[in-house]
Amino acid sequence: MWRPFAVAMVALTSACGTSPAAPSASSAASPSAPGAPTLVQTAITQHYERLFGEKIPWPAVFDDFVSGCGNHVTTTAYVRQTDGRSRLLEIYTSRDGGSVISSRSATVRTPAGTFRVVTLLVNYPQTLGSDAISSWQAAQAQINLDHASFAQSRGYGAPLVRFDNTTVLLGPSQVTNPRALSPVMAALQQNGVDPGGYDFVASVNIDPSRSEGGFSTPGSTPGFIYMGNYSNWTAPLSPENWNNVSRAVYNHEVSHHWGWPGTHDWSCSTPPTFIVPPVLLGWEDVDGDHVPEIIDPTPYGRS
């Protein structure tokens, strides 16, 4: 049973801000398409129609050569469905857009809105220190600040993404297997937290005796994320270490639930605040109507 300030500790983090919203009607009332589509965009529009039967007049395009990450182009389009889901269309092409290297279609969580996240922190004082919950909350808050700063830089009325966080700190003996969703959910339930009402369950297991990375399981309900001791830490994490772990969970692993396959690495771009280029998550205004595509009722210039 959960006991405050004992082996099991629960902390609720209530995020501030408002839900994502389109810019005001006055700012979005006068669409102004940014000139004509480029030759690359025109070629990619044809690929979308041929491969998926979808008209995407203004495709979102990321040229990885510009950021020094490669010599190809990636394009994505989110076709909104219901209940926070979208059909994600992705095409990977030569830099001129002419040759298709790979393509896919998948149903994914839409990367917009408020997401409820419960994190199980496995308590190893050797690496987590004596104030783990406060340290983790500060790192989580930075993620929300990053999204708020991005929205402000683009002139949006509110962040496109916000995380509403709950943190539970449990000893290693209280979690039979921190690497799997079912035992993590069971441990949370046994300590007074029902994970069924959350979008994501994250297990952060900075075990000083085990060096390992993280993973996510897209399609699970709730969406599961595991993060291990990928830097082989053996001393209490610094604030920057905590920020690194938080970015790995929220910017990397959550992005897999939004459809990022991980086959293309854009982390060489500087600075890689969100790991995935925002344009590929629908967070930029591509078609010039002053509304980012992921919340646009007519995204990518679709009618």
Image (cartoon, rainbow, N blue to C red):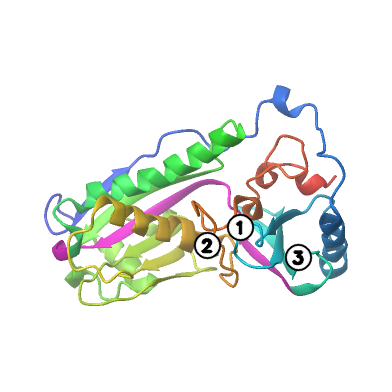
Instruction: Give the labeled residue for mark 3.
Output: 95
Instruction: Give the labeled residue for mark 1.
Output: 67
Which callout, 1 or 2, points at the residue further toward the start of the chain? 1
Q: Secondary structure at mark 2?
A: loop
Magenta: main secondary structure: strand
Q: Compute the Cα span from label 1 to label 2.
A: 7 Å
- Quadrant for residue 152, please give it: top right
Identified by mark 2, the residue type is Cys
- Expressed as whole percent of the image width and height from the top left, the position of residue 91 reads 74, 67
**Callout 3 touching callout 1 (CB < 8 Å):** no
- Expressed as whole percent of the image width and height from the top left, the position of residue 6 reads 11, 55
Along the line of sight, the residue nearer the viewer: 171 or 77: 77
Examine the rendering and report whether any part of residue 196 can be seen: no
Along the line of sight, the residue nearer the viewer: 158 or 2: 158
Q: Secondary structure at mark 1?
A: loop
Identified by mark 1, the residue type is Ser
Which callout, 3 or 2, points at the residue further toward the start of the chain? 3
Along the line of sight, the residue nearer the viewer: 168 or 205: 205
Q: Which mark is residue 268?
A: 2
Which range of residues does the magenta coloring cover? 102-126
Q: Classify the position of the C terminus by image quarter.
A: top right
Q: Compute the Cα span from label 3 to label 1.
A: 13 Å
88 displayed left or right of 47: left
Q: Compute the Cα span from label 3 to label 2.
A: 18 Å
User: Is disc 2 surrounded by few (<14), some (14 to 19) or many (20+) residues within 10 Å?
Assistant: few
Q: Residue drawn at (36%, 57%), measured in percent from left and top?
A: 244
Q: Is residue 103 magenta?
A: yes
**Callout 1 touching callout 2 (CB < 8 Å):** yes
- Spot the residue most to the left: 6
Q: Is residue 3 magenta?
A: no
Q: Residue drawn at (26%, 50%), measured in percent from left and top?
A: 239
